[in-house]
Image (spheres, rainbow, N blue to C red):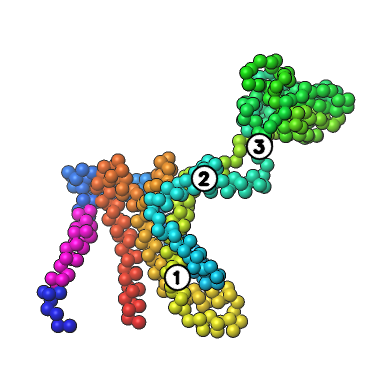
């Protein structure tokens, strides 16, 4: 356009100064600092880089970063594609897009706090475990009295696996007393009735299971006293030679009756009566902490992917889709053979953008992962922060991790730049 070079340089100078101060200088200084020890007083060469690939903690961070790059972008892109296609087929598609995109308005810090609560182990506080426990308890019987155990005067003794079995055998016509302790009377479920003393029944084995303790104390141990509560719903089994020959459950007054076949057998209270309640999944434990955090990331960024893919979908020639349907293709074939190939350039943009983004992931891992499992969820960006500012004080190692992270991001950036140049040439 005839502009003199020095004029163009003058206009570019503020941007170049800013770029140099905020990008070029930090990169150069980090590269130089990575060659020195923790306090910068001694030259160590490539020793810091060697530590990155020999230290177990940094190797875990590298492995987790690789998992993030392999899983998170593909998952978010797939969700965005599904949402973008589906929202075109519903009347309330705009409202759905708004709801899915809304998490993008939340900061990583806020999202981390939200999902730290969602993944809380206690099902009374964590939404994820509340759902899991609800589904589990729908299909599996929960224990009736977790933590209960036989009293010291009881004939019942631990028999392995959490069950309790009587040392002696029972006889028809002779009632059995099975006193339990370990539960506060005011913590019993429902509104328990007073226990009824066992009575003999001709030709049958009868007995009572009750809480041999009452508030305020008193009474005789091993005997049903006034005010002591019945334990309703306890399963009682008659066992002979290791086989269950009869079983019954206690009634509202704690009594049970077994047929004559139980004569001469031992009484057993199965472990199912006393097992601790199901608390759900340990989402933030060593095994699942990384997938759980990736789930939180997908919740945040699925809206971003959906909006970009929906914009690309709006530019797709509908005549091509209709032609495929006319030729006999079903909706799945149209989606797989026509829609996805036409959206390939947009999908690549979303995928590459997310790959660069997850390499720098820091906030979610730092906030969601509890301290005991943070090492299991560690990633390069978090390792870099911890090595330098999180108590490590090793700026040499932190700088080396920063340079390694830069080197990992550069190939993805180059691929993206080449793709953009090819699109311009078209």
Residue at which label 1 appears: 309
Judged by its main secondary structure, the magenta piece is helix
Q: CA distance from mark 1 to mark 2?
A: 33 Å
Q: Secondary structure at mark 1?
A: helix
Which tag is nearer the camera, tag 3 or tag 2? 2
The answer to whether marks 1 and 2 mark residues whose Cβ atoms lie closer than 8 Å is no
Q: Earlier in the sequence, mark 3 or mark 1?
A: 3
Rendered image: mark on residue 80: none
Q: Is residue 295 left or right of residue 210?
A: left
Secondary structure under badge 3?
A: loop
Q: Residues within 10 Å of mark 2 (few under 14, many from 20)?
A: some
Q: Is residue 22 above or below residue 221?
A: below
Disc 2: which residue: 126
The magenta stretch spans residue 13: yes
Residue 67 versus residue 114: which sits nearer the camera? 114
Is 396 left, or right, of 250 in this rendering?
left
Residue at image location 42% in from the left, 69% down from the top: 308
Q: Who comes first in sequence, dot 3 or dot 2?
A: 2
Q: Residue 44: x percent and y percent? A: 21, 47
Relative image position of residue 291 (x, y in whole percent):
47, 52
Per the image, the residue denoted by label 3 is: 143
Residue 126 is one of the magenta-drawn residues = no
């Amino acid at each position: 356009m005839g502009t003199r070079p020095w004029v163009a340089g003058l206009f570019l100078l503020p941007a170049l100064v800013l770029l140099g101060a905020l990008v070029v200088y930090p990169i150069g200084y980090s590269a130089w600092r990575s060659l020195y020890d923790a306090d910068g007083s001694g030259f160590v060469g490539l020793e810091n880089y060697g530590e990155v690939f020999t230290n177990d903690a940094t190797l875990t961070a590298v492995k987790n970063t690789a998992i993030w790059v392999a899983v998170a972008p593909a998952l978010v892109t797939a969700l965005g594609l599904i949402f973008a296609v589906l929202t075109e087929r519903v009347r309330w598609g705009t409202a759905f897009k708004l709801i899915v995109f809304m998490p993008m308005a939340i900061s990583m810090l806020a999202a981390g706090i939200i999902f730290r609560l969602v993944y809380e182990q206690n099902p009374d506080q964590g939404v994820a475990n509340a759902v899991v426990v609800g589904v589990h308890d729908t299909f599996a019987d929960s224990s009736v009295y977790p933590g209960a155990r036989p009293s010291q005067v009881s004939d019942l003794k631990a028999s392995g696996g959490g069950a309790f079995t009587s040392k002696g055998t029972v006889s028809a016509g002779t009632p059995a007393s099975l006193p339990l302790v370990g539960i506060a009377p005011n913590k019993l479920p429902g509104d328990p009735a007073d226990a009824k003393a066992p009575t003999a029944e001709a030709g049958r084995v009868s007995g009572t299971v009750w809480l041999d303790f009452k508030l305020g104390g008193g009474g005789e141990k091993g005997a049903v006293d006034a005010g002591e509560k019945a334990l309703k719903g306890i399963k009682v089994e008659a066992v002979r030679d290791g086989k269950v020959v009869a079983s019954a459950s206690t009634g509202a007054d704690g009594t049970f009756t077994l047929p004559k076949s139980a004569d001469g057998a031992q009484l057993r209270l199965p472990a199912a009566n006393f097992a601790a309640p199901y608390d759900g999944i340990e989402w933030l434990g060593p095994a699942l902490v990384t997938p759980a955090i990736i789930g939180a990331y997908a919740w945040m960024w699925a809206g971003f992917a959906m909006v970009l893919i929906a914009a690309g979908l709006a530019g797709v020639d509908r005549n091509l889709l209709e032609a495929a349907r006319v030729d006999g293709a079903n909706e799945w074939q149209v989606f797989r053979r026509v829609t996805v190939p036409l959206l390939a350039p947009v999908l690549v943009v979303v995928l590459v953008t997310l790959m660069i983004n997850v390499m720098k992931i820091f906030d979610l891992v730092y906030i969601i992962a509890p301290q005991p499992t943070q090492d299991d969820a560690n990633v390069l960006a978090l390792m870099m922060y911890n090595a330098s500012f999180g108590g490590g004080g090793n700026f040499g190692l932190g700088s080396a991790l920063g340079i390694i992270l830069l080197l990992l991001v550069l190939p993805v950036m180059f691929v993206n730049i080449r793709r953009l140049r090819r699109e311009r040439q078209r």
